[in-house]
Amino acid sequence: MSNQFDLQDYVSNGIESVIRGIIKASLKNPKETAFVIKFALAIKEAQRKKKLNEENGHSIPAFLISSISSSCNLFCSGCYARATQSCGDGFSKEQMTNERWKEIFIEARELGISFILLAGGEPFMRKDVLQSAAQVKEIMFPIFTNGTMFEEEDIKLLDKNRNLVPILSIEGDKEQTDKRRGQGTYNIIMDSMDNLHSKGILYGISVTVTRDNIETITSEDYFELLYNKGCKALIYVEYVPLIEETKNSAPTDFERTILETELQKLRMKYEDAIFLSFPGDEKFSGGCLAAGRGFFHINVDGSAEPCPFSPFSDTNLKNCNLREALNSPLFNHLKESGMLLEEHDGGCVLFEKENEVKEIMNKTK
């Protein structure tokens, strides 16, 4: 992989490539074609706004990660959201209102942000927020879902609003998925893929990378199975252990090297699909992209955090706008410290430097 790899350019160009492939493969799908044309124009307008903001001294990230729900119907082994208590029972009072989420989506559009990743918990447990996101057509919302809660009304929502793109989470093959996510989960996800594919709905897959599944999830045969079911994006997310019992599941440099090598092969063969790796791709993008360099995380209660694996915050979006959150003391100190630019082999920099982040937090108080 070239050291000049630009993650933002790859995503933008990759979306266009996926779109061209969709048009070529399904000329009978006027909904997708109409969305493609409008979104291509929206991206150009977003780039204009982003450039104008940057000329005025305001750095705008390429995307946001927003955890919109603190509830989930699954109890996956080693779940970081439950480990950090950002997901679980009894958190409903802390969740931001649907009205505030919609305001944030509109603020993002005006800043020139074209992509907002919706996560949880399980995002489909906040259908009110998904409906609000659907109304902001200039932004594409990849929805990171476990894929087990799709009802007829959800499929209709996705079919009508092509800026909502479900990203289904899976762990590899049937045995690997059911072991971590619960018995029967794999078959439900496969059925969800077939349902989405039958409607011509663009979707992707998110895979948690561990030592146990690395050979399965990086194989060409594995993606060929997903590709034939209509999958157009495969996102690898390295497992970050937050409890002692799951540390042996975290990938090492050995697994990261396999991922990097096989990722390049997949990118070369499947030009009409997108392949991303987090945090692996960041090391080719000039350092960690957290804390607003490329993205930041909005927690379910409105806290502006560097990233989901670094859940520290001194600013809350219940009390400020997006531009103010981007200039939070914590974010500015992290960027000025040089910590985000330090070389690393693919692991999460801020997670590995938790104590240093806490020290910076204390300085900003």
Image (cartoon, rainbow, N blue to C red):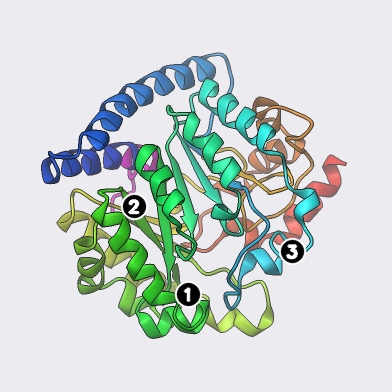
Label 3, on which residue?
A: 85
Quarter of the figure with the N terminus: bottom left
Is 278 rendered above or below residue 259? Answer: above
Dot 1: element: loop
The answer to whether the residues at label 3 and label 1 have Cβ atoms under 8 Å apart is no
**How many C-alpha atoms fall within 10 Å of the one at disc 3: few (<14), some, or many (≥20)?**
few
Label 1, on which residue?
A: 251
Asked whether the viewer can see residue 284, the reply is no
Q: Earlier in the sequence, mark 3 or mark 1?
A: 3
- The kind of residue tagged 2 is Tyr
Point out the residue furthest to the front here.
152
Q: Which residues are magenta?
A: 1-10
**How many C-alpha atoms fall within 10 Å of the one at disc 1: few (<14), some, or many (≥20)?**
many
Label 2, on which residue?
A: 203
Q: Quadrant of residue 226?
A: bottom left
- The kind of residue tagged 1 is Pro
Quarter of the figure with the C terminus: top right
Q: Position of residue 284 (x, y in %)?
A: 40, 50
- The kind of residue tagged 3 is Gln
